[in-house]
Image (spheres, rainbow, N blue to C red):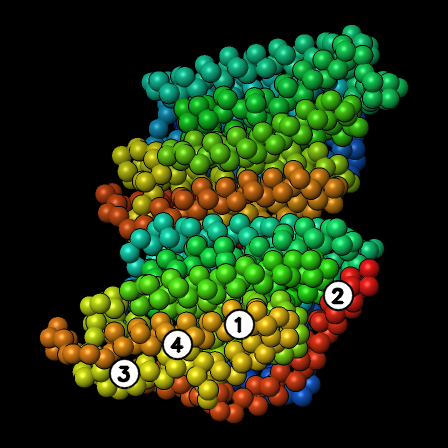
Amino acid sequence: MSALIFTIVLGIIVLYLGFLKKKAILAPVAIAGLLIALFLSLKDWGLGSRYFHDMILFDNFSIAFNISMIIVTILIFLFGIDYYRMMGLHVAEQYALMIFALTGAFLMTSYSNLIILFLGIEILSIPLYVLAGGKKASFRSNEASFKYFMLGSFATAIFLFGIALVYGASATFYLPEIKIYIAQFNGHLPPMVMVGLLFILIGVAFKVAAAPFHFWSPDVYEGSPTIVTAFMATVVKTAGFAAFFRLLGMGLLPLPAPLEKALWVMTGLTLLVGNLGALKQTNFKRLLAYSAIAHSGFIMLAMLSQHSSSAKVLLYYTFVYSLATVPLFIIFILVKRASDWQEELVNFRGLFKEKSWIAVCMTILLMSLAGIPPSSGFMAKYQVFVLSISQGNLLISIFAILMAVIGIYYYFFVIREVFTESKQLNPIVVTRLNGALIIVCSLAVLLLGVFVWNLPI
Amino acid sequence: MILLAILLIPILTGLLLLPFRKAKLVRSIALASSILNLLLTLILAFSPETSAFHVNWINYMGINFSLGYDGISLIMLLLTNLLFPFILLAGFGREQRNVHLLNFLILFAQSALIGVFLAQNAFLFYVFWELALIPVYFILLIWGGDGRKSITFKFFIYTLTGSLFLLFGIIYLYQLTPGMHTTDFAAFNQLNIPTGTQVWLFWILFIAFAIKMPVFPFHTWQPPTYNMASTQGVMILAGVMTKMGIYGALRFLFPIVPSGVLFWQNTVIILSLIGVVYASIIAFRKTNLKMLIAFSSMAHISLMVTAMFVLNTYALQGLLFQVMSHGVTIVALFYLTSLLKEKTGTIELPQMGGLKLQAPNMAVLFLIVVLGSIALPLTAGFVGEFLMIAGIFKQSAWFAAIGGLTMIFGAIYMLFAYQRAMLGDKKLVYSKLTDVHTLDYLILIPLIVIILGLGIYPQPLFNLMGQTIHSAENILKPLVEGALILKTN
């Protein structure tokens, strides 16, 4: 709880620091604050403290996810030092908004009451709508912001409607009570509850960009400023899945048969859309957007294969996925700067010749996303498959494996470009910090795969 | 401990090489390490006591870092470590970009391959299996020839598709193991899987190996990849990586899904016999020497697959012998091919001819290797193929007759190719052509000595296989029992 309060205060402090007109101190303050928040979260470990009539529950699940999101946000802020030096006037707001969004994410991992989940989603989303439009002069950015806002609010409305319907039937917002309420029907739910639950699931599925509620994500990822895209692809996704998992684990499982079927179909569709969609992309950001959708599919596979270790797998998967994605966006920005702000895949040509160490790091990161051993991405996928196969979901596992093959195809398409010879026009400039970030993340991705296979929850 | 040393020496040497920029130094260090590794392997092979290495890795998922070996692994290990010094030697004195990186990747591949052959745990096996692919992918992508981008891509996706099914199979077997789940081969071998499951599980496991070997109709990646690959790349691919498929099939299929093997036995045999005939005919029609050898390799491998699936000790012994002789022969053949390419600038047979007049020594070396490849008596190929065909004959005379076509067809297209490349009138284009250099002798003479030596006196290898035959019988025992049960029902 102290971490949550501290983070909100931190956001306000950073916002007011903007008045000092000293861009240089913003990031260090924000990062130092996040480190304190990290420490405060660690202190709550194992306490399982409850607040506000049990509406918020900081159990180990939520703390583990919070810590992973804080770490990823710190990485993004470290990237921000260089990113915002090159562009942007109102930097304080950007940091502050991201910190506010992070508090929303904290709520999403630790709710046990649907209203808090709703609040969390809104606190997370509204700053993102603003952040997506961060490049005021860019049409693409405006489009992204507007699209995200429209579709996002629509999804939120459906979500709220769902909560209202469930409340109307069960007279409670508390997940454990809803669970008891559902259990008495033995799987034959009255239509009102069924529709309500479906709407709630749709609302959450929108946040994690699960098909068929994924249409916003490629456009928004492409249009948003890259650092915001990195934030959306990692922290927002992690928060969405933590919320999703909690919703299922605390309240809705075992799902009534039609809903379960709907979720399985969603999983299959997400895998299909994400991977097939990524195949034909020539824009790196769109490619990563589709790859994010594809990864959502794998995570949903782990989530639906209920087992005592599902939460661990989920945490590990989202964390190593984030750890590989953030540096990829950094490399993308470096290459983009060197090639006249082009975002196409072909711009990666000649990277191996120009800066071979970046090329090697990028290969490691992409291999992790593709799930090639011994990277941590492989361990994550391996555990997902172990979960789903040992729960007897053989057909969907085979399907997921086929989709993983397609995944390898487009990730290696990028790797191939990296190792293709070409005359890079401008030299790639890497600041020391960015270089360190890339190398540290790549090493972490590699070493986590060999030495750490799950994170404590 | 010696196993761990054999596994780690190449990759550690490779990492050590990375800062160096002097091509000759890099190559020499790499070569020295691989010779050291060969010596260690020989010590291992001829030492009476067995060695093993075991560390717990991921306990809660039953994954152990355990290395060990039996007769089959030993043959594979010996082949790998025997060929890699030659593969590294093939780089000497040649123009290459990024020599340190290339040698690192080659040594990386060597470590991964050794890991595949030593792993006693299916998960570990899988990790090494995939790891072996990555350096080879980059060797092909960076140092390959024309069209490397799309061909490498196809090769990579093709083989990875198979591997992922293998991964599925491993996980499926893992969750079948009783009690604390584990991925140890020992536990897998104890499993008693219902026949219905084995029937589909067979293909899940087999596809990865079928692609790697390759078995008809999973072979389409192979000829263009061989054709495009650099000398060293193709030596690794054809010499060692195809053997991964054979090894994997022996390790996974026979002990774990014996009923599946029996169920599909004839299907696989027929597929591979189609492969024999098909590849031989195409090899005969090819005018590109490298393509020709690629298809001839496929024909030989297909015969080996047939021998593997007839399930008797003769064929299995022949198979293991042939693993060795095919590896050595094909490496020598591909080295000679690239030598021809360097000397004449082409490997298109119609443009060649009359080389014997210019380079008599090369012609002699080439002839010996060609004869080894067509399994002439007194070469290693003969011993292997004879045993295999004898084994296949026990299964069915028809299978043996079609399988025997490899030797006949092989003789036709290889000798025809030799005639077109080496004999005939002298061509003016080659007026500046020089004969074989010392370096080439260093590579070819030892390989030829092995080919002839094993052909004249194969007993050492059979002695080495002493344990292998034992383990082969162990592999076959449940199968034969299973066949009896099927017959009595």
Q: Residue at x 62, y 27 (%)?
A: A266
> In the visual, does A183 lie left or right of B137?
right
Identify whether A250 is placed above or below B437. Answer: above
**Pointer 3 residue:** B363
Q: Position of residue A220 (x, y in %)?
A: 46, 23
Report helix, strand or loop for mark 3. helix
Chain of the residue displaying label 4 = B
* Residue type for callout 1: Ala
Residue A160 visible in the picture: yes
**Pointer 4 residue:** B411
Check if mark 3 and mark 1 are on a common chain.
Answer: yes
* Residue type for callout 2: Ala
Q: Earlier in the sequence, mark 4 or mark 2?
A: 4
Check if mark 3 and mark 2 are on a common chain.
Answer: yes
Q: Nearer the viewer, residue B287 or B168?
A: B287
Chain of the residue displaying label 1 = B
Report helix, strand or loop for mark 1. helix
Local packing at callout 4 (Cα closer than 10 Å; few below 14, some 14-19, many 20+) is some
Q: Nearer the viewer, residue A133 or B243?
A: B243
Q: Residue furthest right?
A: A184
Name the image quarter holding residue B143. bottom left
**Pointer 1 residue:** B401
**Pointer 2 residue:** B483
Q: Position of residue B297 (x, y in %)?
A: 43, 68
Q: Residue at x 65, y 38 (%)?
A: A396
| Structural distance between the alpha carbons of marks 3 and 1 | 32 Å
| Structural distance between the alpha carbons of marks 1 and 4 | 16 Å
> In the visual, does A106 lie left or right of B31?
right
